[in-house]
Image (cartoon, coloured by chain):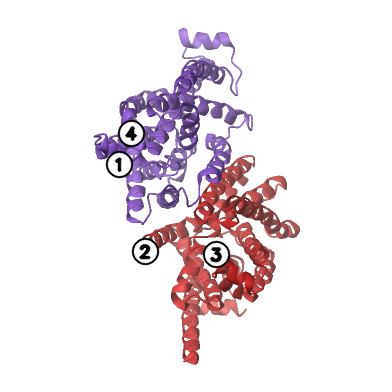
């Protein structure tokens, strides 16, 4: 029977890929002006003769789509890891305040270096590349505070974890607001929009900046995914398996914070993807992280791509911050989880 | 008990003096230097054509008063919520009350523009009631949902949801800017009309709170004791929630969302004067007013000559305190 099961997994994965592809199709053909499929295909393969089309596709739509997919994958994986480490279904980088910490650090970076990535045309490579690093510092700081407060008597208190997250969220949010107020008016508006979670100023430089983080840390997490299964066991059992529990936990945590920081520095704070994707994945493929991690990644990409499509088109020509769309979809789901858990 | 009443007397005497002093400072100092003489003239001998007089009359004085009132309102609202829910984390900003009010205001700005000020205040109060009802409704749906921590989480999440919805609606109808003015603290725009209009609502709330004080003390001891003492717990609960809604609704209508005042002040007050709400509520009024006017002063000078939103200041003070509360009392044992 295991063979049969594997087939199911592939079938499910295929369905997800189809969904992602459909979202991709919607995203790439709709926008300020609609394009037909032949136009898109021609332009994509360099056979188009309309320079306007290739400008729109290569400079605006494609980077945005790629970033939506990457950020979706990153947040979903990070959510998986956090839920695994904390043994808690309600953990999410946004709820825990890691987003906010990274966000405050990136705001600080923007202020100090008088640099606003969303406005940049991608020519300031060094600065764009160092943004995720700053985000990482903030994210690690936030994660450090959260875990310092949540550890008591040598174990992680889940409720306290969430509460500290709320506090850290509003604290770093206030800090970021304070920092952005020191910027010029123009920068402030963009920074405020960026904090709400938005990817419409995407360009290729961002992708290059976040890709190494996502690939290296993503592979690391994927290779260590069996640990996430072990974390679900009793602590004494894990220790008796010869695993240095605390050290592995911290390594996994750092990896996920790194991914989140890279995502936040590019797209601002987008919550609830990291919460929803692993949940949906577990409903589809069960609890083994061998499947949960890749499936979460796919689901995260699909969710964020669809949300971004909604954000882009629903109130066109004005853009809604994608973070807002994700919260409106994600929060009812979160409440549903809470109600169902009773 | 004797000692706490002594401390309370000291507070009752010292706090008003400090309040007067801070208010005085906040009227005298501002971005524009105005001499004491001019200030006095603007009060006793108002000259419409003099810009300095206008600044004092239509900006600094209303602002100083508004900050005092809102501080008192929010502190009392927080104290009542913590008392009747026996929840050490209850507070208007954590329980979706602020966000509910801001959400309804958004709807009003979009769908029924041109409302008078007093109608806005009423709507804001209705919104507070809605937010609170949503959060507590969900809390009672969920197992263990009314425990301090769970309720705080539900409150935060529903609050985020309401404000996301409001953002989307505001975006769609292109009134983001108007809404932003309502949402964010807008102390600098307070005017005398609005202030006078909202006073009655707030005053009713405060009086209700003072009347209920004794009953709240009893409720805070536990349901069984309260019922045993012959108290109509349900009625008290509704009445005091009504006071909370009046107080927060008015506050949001006046100056927008301000977090952490309603959480922090009642704790400090309880620490000083003990558990009797007949002492806690009057002291919350005084200390809340003092705290918020101090924050307002700080907010004006933190980034001089630009103002920092007062919410940033209250957050910087409130969050370490919140963390301390979690650290010392949080966790499953108390949840």
Spot occupied by residue A217 in the image (x, y as percentages of width and height): 67, 69
Q: Which of labels 2 and 3 is toward the front?
A: 2
For the residues labelled 4 and 1, the Cα–Cα distance comes to: 10 Å
Q: In this view of the protein, can residue A48 be seen by the observer?
A: no
The subunit letter for the residue under badge 1 reads B
Judged from the image, the secondary structure of the residue bearing numbered disc 2 is: helix
The subunit letter for the residue under badge 2 reads A
User: In this rendering, do the residues under marks 3 and 1 share a single chain?
Assistant: no
Q: Which of labels 1 and 2 is toward the front?
A: 1
For the residues labelled 2 and 3, the Cα–Cα distance comes to: 20 Å
Q: Nearer the viewer, residue B67 or B269?
A: B269
Judged from the image, the secondary structure of the residue bearing numbered disc 3 is: helix
Q: Earlier in the sequence, mark 2 or mark 3?
A: 3
Spot occupied by residue B170 in the image (x, y as percentages of width and height): 42, 48
Q: Tell which chain the image draws in purple.
A: B
Badge 3 density bin: few <14, some 14–19, many ≥20, Cα 10 Å: many
Image disc number at residue B224: 1
The subunit letter for the residue under badge 3 reads A
Residue at mark 3: A79
């Amino acid at each position: 029977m295991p063979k049969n099961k594997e087939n199911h997994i592939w079938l499910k994965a295929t369905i997800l890929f189809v969904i992602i592809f459909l979202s991709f199709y919607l995203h790439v053909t709709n926008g300020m002006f609609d394009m037909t499929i032949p136009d898109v295909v021609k332009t994509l393969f360099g056979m188009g003769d309309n320079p306007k089309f290739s400008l729109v596709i290569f400079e605006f739509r494609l980077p945005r789509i790629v970033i939506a997919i990457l950020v979706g994958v990153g947040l979903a994986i990070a959510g998986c890891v956090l839920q695994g480490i904390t043994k808690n279904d309600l953990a999410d980088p946004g709820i825990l305040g890691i987003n906010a910490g990274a966000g405050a650090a990136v705001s600080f970076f923007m202020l100090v270096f008088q640099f606003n990535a969303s406005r940049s045309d991608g020519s300031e490579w060094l600065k764009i590349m160092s943004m995720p690093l700053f985000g990482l510092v903030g994210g690690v700081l936030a994660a450090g505070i959260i875990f310092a407060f949540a550890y008591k008597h040598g174990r992680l208190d889940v409720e306290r974890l969430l509460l500290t997250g709320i506090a850290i969220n509003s604290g770093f949010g206030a800090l970021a607001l304070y920092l952005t107020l020191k910027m010029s008016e123009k920068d402030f508006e963009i920074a405020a929009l960026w904090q709400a979670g938005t990817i419409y100023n995407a360009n290729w430089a961002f992708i290059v900046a976040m890709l190494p983080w996502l690939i290296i840390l993503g592979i690391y997490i994927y290779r260590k995914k069996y640990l996430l299964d072990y974390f679900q066991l009793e602590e004494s059992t894990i220790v008796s398996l010869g695993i240095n529990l605390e050290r592995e936990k911290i390594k996994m945590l750092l990896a996920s914070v790194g991914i989140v920081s890279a995502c936040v520095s590019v797209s601002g704070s987008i919550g609830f993807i990291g919460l929803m994707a692993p949940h949906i994945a577990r409903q589809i493929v069960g609890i083994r992280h061998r499947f949960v991690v890749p499936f979460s990644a796919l689901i995260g990409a699909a969710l964020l791509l669809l949300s971004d499509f909604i954000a882009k088109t629903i109130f066109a020509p004005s853009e809604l911050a994608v973070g807002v769309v994700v919260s409106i979809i994600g929060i009812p789901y979160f409440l549903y989880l809470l109600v169902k858990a009773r | 008990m004797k000692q706490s009443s002594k401390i309370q007397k000291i507070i009752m005497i010292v706090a008003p003096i400090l309040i007067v002093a801070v208010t005085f400072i906040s009227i005298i100092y501002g971005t524009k230097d105005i001499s004491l003489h001019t200030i006095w003239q603007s009060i006793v001998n108002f000259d419409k054509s003099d810009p300095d007089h206008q600044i004092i009359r239509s900006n600094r004085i209303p602002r100083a008063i508004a900050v005092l009132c809102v501080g008192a309102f929010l502190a009392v609202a927080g104290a009542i919520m913590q008392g009747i829910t026996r929840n050490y984390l209850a507070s208007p900003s954590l329980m979706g009350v602020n966000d509910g009010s801001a959400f309804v205001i958004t709807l009003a700005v979009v769908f029924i523009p041109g409302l008078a000020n007093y109608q806005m205040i009423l709507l804001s109060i209705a919104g507070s009631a809605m937010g609170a009802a949503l959060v507590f409704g969900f809390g009672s749906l969920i197992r263990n949902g009314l425990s301090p921590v769970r309720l705080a989480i539900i409150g935060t999440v529903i609050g985020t949801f309401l404000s996301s919805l409001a953002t989307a609606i505001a975006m769609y109808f292109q009134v983001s800017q108007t809404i932003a003015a309502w949402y964010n603290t807008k102390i600098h725009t307070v005017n005398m009309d609005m202030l006078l209009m909202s006073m009655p609502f707030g005053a009713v709330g405060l009086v209700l709170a003072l009347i209920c004080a004794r009953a709240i003390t009893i409720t805070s001891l536990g349901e069984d004791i309260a019922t045993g003492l012959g108290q109509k717990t349900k009625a008290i609960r509704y009445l005091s929630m009504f006071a909370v809604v009046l107080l927060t609704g008015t506050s949001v209508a006046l100056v927008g969302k301000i977090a952490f005042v309603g959480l922090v002040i009642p704790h400090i007050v309880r620490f000083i004067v003990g558990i009797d709400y007949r002492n806690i509520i009057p002291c919350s009024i005084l200390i809340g007013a003092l705290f918020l006017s101090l924050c307002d002063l700080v907010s004006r000078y933190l980034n001089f000559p630009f103002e920092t939103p007062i919410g940033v200041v209250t957050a910087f003070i409130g969050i370490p305190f919140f963390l301390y509360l979690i650290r010392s009392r949080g966790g499953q044992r108390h949840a």
